[in-house]
């Protein structure tokens, strides 16, 4: 399976993704500079975390004009897979490939800690092999991750089963206390209506190596790959 | 071609909680300044732009706001245009 990991000025989780995909998952990975125009035949485009363009204006707002984003939109339009994590999620919402926006955390704090995620929809490639009764322990690290969308869009996300992940307690229950950044409906990740573009704030790539003491994140990559391999 | 200056105000939408504003309100209260009931924080963006007339300058400013400067999901904007002085 071929992955492209995009690199913007200010990306800082690109190498973590390359490491997990190449060294742990054994996949073919190319890093693609944001000024390039070619996704080099990648089947999955990864938009990594970081602070693209220093988060100037709004997180993700300037990155969406990078030349490679035109190719990413065309790839998504053709049904190709795109997965944005943290700043990558912010970039995809700014680019209009995912609905809603990520606002400053309600607590006003940059929150960096392990949290629990529950899978709400298993009807995507990314989530098909995840267990919706389980809470996955995944690190979050962001200052602007409060998911917001107007009521009509929220309703659509619910009606069309586009909410992939919610912040939850260790036992999987969804509570206000577990919703550290103040996201509407505890939303931590969503997909587009065509179900081939995914965005999430927490970082599964930071919990995929045994050396780090938590491999819950690897399950997300295994889910994506397992289902992709099944399709071939 | 004339040169115009656009003074753009970008504010978080009314229905959206503004944590930055809340933090500033707290700071003001800590100063001992009484009677500040609410603080909301936005951005002021200044563009200097060339246009044949004011109508075109309005059009360009709106395009800049809608396509980049403002995210309509979370923000509202207003602007004033005036010819550049001197």
Image: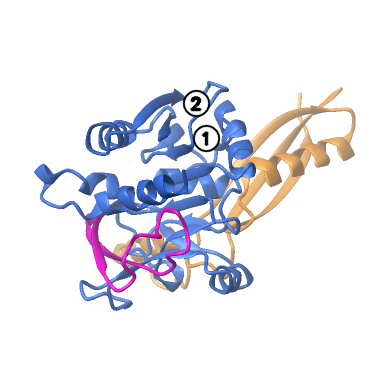
Chain colours: A blue, B orange
> Quick check: can you spot residue A117?
yes
* Viewer-closest of A77 and A6: A77
* Subunit of label 1: A
Q: Would residue B73 appear left or right of A165 to someone viewing this image? A: right
| Residue A120 position within the rendered picture, expressed as x and y whole percent measured from the top left | 41, 69
* Viewer-closest of A109 and B57: A109
Residue at (47% x, 48% y) in the render: A231
Per the rendered image, the range of residues in magenta is A113-139
| Residue B83 position within the rendered picture, expressed as x and y whole percent measured from the top left | 80, 33
Residue at (42% x, 32% y) in the render: A2
Q: Is residue A214 above or below residue A44?
A: below
Q: Is residue B40 above or below residue B60?
A: below
Q: From the image, which quarter does the N terminus of chain A lie in?
A: top left
Contact check, label 1 and label 2, Cβ < 8 Å:
yes
Q: Is residue B16 above or below residue A47?
A: below
| Residue for badge 2 | A34
Give the mark nearest the N terminus, 1 or 2: 2
The tag on residue A63 is 1
Q: Is residue A203 above or below residue A136?
A: above
Based on the displayed image, in which of its 4 quarters is residue A145 positioned? bottom left
* Subunit of label 2: A
| Residue B33 position within the rendered picture, expressed as x and y whole percent measured from the top left | 37, 66
């Amino acid at each position: 399976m071929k992955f492209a990991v995009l690199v913007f000025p200010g990306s800082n989780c690109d190498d973590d993704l390359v490491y997990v995909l190449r060294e742990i998952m054994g996949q073919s990975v190319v890093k693609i500079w944001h000024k390039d125009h070619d996704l080099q035949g990648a089947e999955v485009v990864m938009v990594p975390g970081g602070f693209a363009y220093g988060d100037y204006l709004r997180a993700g707002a300037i990155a969406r004009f990078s030349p490679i984003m035109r190719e990413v939109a065309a790839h998504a339009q053709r049904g190709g897979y795109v997965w944005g994590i943290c700043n990558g999620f912010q970039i995809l919402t700014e680019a209009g490939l995912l609905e809603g926006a990520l606002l400053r955390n309600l607590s006003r704090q940059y929150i960096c800690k392990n949290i629990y995620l529950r899978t709400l929809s298993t009807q995507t490639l990314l989530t098909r092999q995840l267990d919706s009764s389980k809470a996955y322990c995944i690190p979050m690290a962001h200052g602007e991750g409060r998911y917001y969308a107007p009521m009509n869009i929220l309703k659509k996300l619910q009606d069309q089963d586009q909410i992939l992940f919610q912040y939850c307690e260790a036992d999987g229950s969804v509570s206000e206390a577990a919703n550290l950044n103040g996201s509407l409906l505890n939303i931590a990740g969503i997909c587009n209506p065509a179900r081939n573009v995914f965005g999430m704030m927490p970082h599964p790539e930071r919990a995929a190596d045994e050396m780090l003491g938590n491999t819950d994140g690897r399950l997300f990559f295994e889910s994506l790959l397992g289902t992709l391999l099944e399709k071939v | 071609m004339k040169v115009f200056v656009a003074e753009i105000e970008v504010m978080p939408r009314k229905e959206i909680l503004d944590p930055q504003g809340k933090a500033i309100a707290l700071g003001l209260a800590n100063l001992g300044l009484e009677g500040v009931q609410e603080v909301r924080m936005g951005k002021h963006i200044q563009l200097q732009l060339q246009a044949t007339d004011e109508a075109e300058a309005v059009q360009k400013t709106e395009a800049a706001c809608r396509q980049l400067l403002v995210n309509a999901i979370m923000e509202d904007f207003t602007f004033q245009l005036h010819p550049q002085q001197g």
